Amino acid sequence: MSFLVDAETQRGAFELEKKLAKRWDEEAFEHYVTAVVKEEQAIAEFDAYAQLLSHLYDALEIVDWRAGEIRDGATANWLLNETLTLMEELTDKRIQSFVKTVRNHQPQLITYLAWIAADLPDWQNRTALFLPDESDADIFQRTVARHWRFQQMLTNGHTQWRTAADDAALELSLWTDTLPDLGRLASDLMAILDAAGHTNSINECLNGILRSFLQNRQSFRNLETLQAYLDLFVLWHNMRVFQRGKRRGQSPFQIAGIQTHSDDWLTMLGF
């Protein structure tokens, strides 16, 4: 939400101040004092809102970039609730409207942390085979998560974090160069974090998958070529076995009860 101190409030105080500088007027001075008080209140609300907004952003993080800690749902929900409660004490109507909107969606805002909590134990058990010391395993997890977080920053255009991202990548390489098996585990954890950061809307998930394919195809020769490409995508997706979630272990065809003579889409095409 973009919230700025009301320009009209500031302009009113400034105009009254200019009038008083030219000619003293008791009545104008009283209006000026009232306008200054109103302006100061608006500035104070803005300062409070700006600070609380940073806490709101923090409550919605997947990974704490400072320590690499993967957030748990209870902590995130507590911070989110406390932040919104303090925001509700502010009187600006725009802030009140914003808080009301967030409150309406609050139960769904951090569901991605529940998805991570469901997938993380299996990854941690596999990691323990290579890092039996719990302290080492925890440091490795934080190192991978922190690297992932910085990569997200760069992807979103925050190039000011490039040096920190390079340092995080170097820290991770010290682990994976020593034990190559940790490289696969690092990729697996980043895949879990990537999946959690996506919407649970089926349409949006499909759009995200299709977008990665289309990025390699900037244009098509004609509409027939485009349709053929989309047909291949549909076949591939419908035969792809889900790796997580309630549909894990099944493909869309299997869920729909469609029987095929092969589980491989290329075999279905004769390759």
Image (cartoon, rainbow, N blue to C red):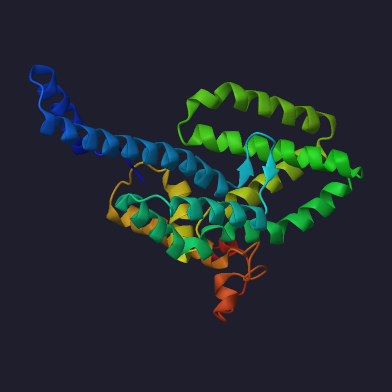
Q: Residue furthest top?
A: 22
Q: Residue furthest left?
A: 23
Q: Kindly tell me whether residue 77 is visible in this rendering.
A: yes
Please state if 44 lies on the left or on the right of 175 as rendered: left
Of residues 58 and 216, the one nearer the viewer is: 58
Residue at image location 18% in from the left, 37% down from the top:
8
Please state if 187 lies on the left or on the right of 6 as rendered: right
Quarter of the image where one finds residue 227 = bottom left
Could you tell me how many numbered marks the image carries?
A: 0
Q: State the quadrant of the C terminus.
A: bottom right
Of residues 261 and 29, the one nearer the viewer is: 29
Q: Residue furthest bottom?
A: 257
Of residues 85 and 178, the one nearer the viewer is: 85
**Residue 48 pos. (x, y %):** 44, 40
Q: Kindly tell me whether residue 184 is visible in this rendering.
A: no
Q: Residue furthest right?
A: 132
Of residues 264 and 87, the one nearer the viewer is: 87
Residue at image location 73% in from the left, 31% down from the top:
172
**Residue 196 pos. (x, y %):** 59, 54
Residue at image location 56% in from the left, 48% down from the top:
59
**Residue 24 pos. (x, y %):** 10, 22
**Residue 105 pos. (x, y %):** 46, 63
Please state if 237 lies on the left or on the right of 137 as rendered: left
Q: In the picture shown, does residue 175 fall above or below 237?
A: above
Residue at image location 48% in from the left, 43% down from the top:
52
